[in-house]
Amino acid sequence: MEILGYIAAIIAALAFVVLVVYVIITLKATKETLNNVSETMTNLEKQMQGVTSETTELLAKTNKLADDVNYKSSKLNGLFDGAKGIGDTVKDFNDSLKQLSESIRRTSKENPEKAAQAIKWGSAMMDLWKKKSK
């Protein structure tokens, strides 16, 4: 019976040695995997630093471009305000011409002789102005 005890002890010792060998192999593989992960993380950190600096530069350029667009847009607002003023002036001028035309038409109906005389004087003035312009 003593031999069975020794055989059992030898089998247990061999099983323990096999277990230790497999644990060592697993730990070595785990160490390699962790080293690869560490290298990958280091490379990723370097790439992220490059991306971060490029992103910061791009953001600065975008902000500068947005400021430039806003500045030029505000300048255009003045131009549109000026164009609106010109449009208002032309409208006022047209209204004045309509009033003058209406006044001349009314006056010509009331005093046809004076209207004919005014037309003659206007034609004479235009002829003089044309001759003087040449």
Image (tube, rainbow, N blue to C red):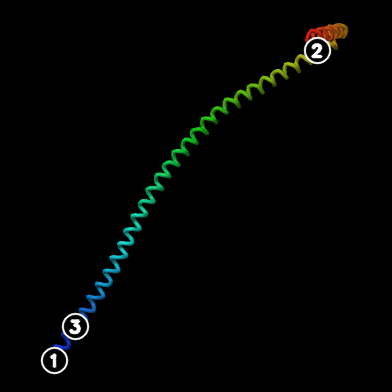
Residue lying at the far left in this picture: please name it: 2
Q: Judge depth for marks 1 and 2 and give the one in front.
A: 1
Residue highlighted by disc 2: 104
Q: Position of residue 24 (x, y in %)?
A: 24, 72
Q: Tell me: residue 9, above or below residue 48.
A: below
The residue closer to the viewer here, 94 or 1, is 1
Q: Which mark is residue 3?
A: 1
Residue highlighted by disc 3: 12
Sequence-wise, the earlier of marks 1 and 3 is: 1
The residue closer to the viewer here, 36 or 64, is 36
Q: Where is residue 10 in the image (x, y as percent from the top left)?
A: 17, 85
Mark 2 Cα within 10 Å, few/some/many (few <14, many 20+)? few
Q: Which mark is residue 83?
A: none
Q: Tell me: residue 30, above or below residue 53.
A: below
Task: Say which residue appears at 61% left-offset and 23% top-offset.
Answer: 82
* Residue 50 relative to residue 111: left or right: left
Q: Position of residue 112 (x, y in %)?
A: 87, 9
Q: Which amino acid does label 3 sit on?
A: Ala
Q: Which element carries disc 3, helix, strand or loop? A: helix
Task: Say which residue appears at 14% left-offset and 88% top-offset.
Answer: 6
* Residue 6 relative to residue 43: left or right: left
Mark 1 Cα within 10 Å, few/some/many (few <14, many 20+)? few
Q: What residue type is labelled 2?
A: Ile
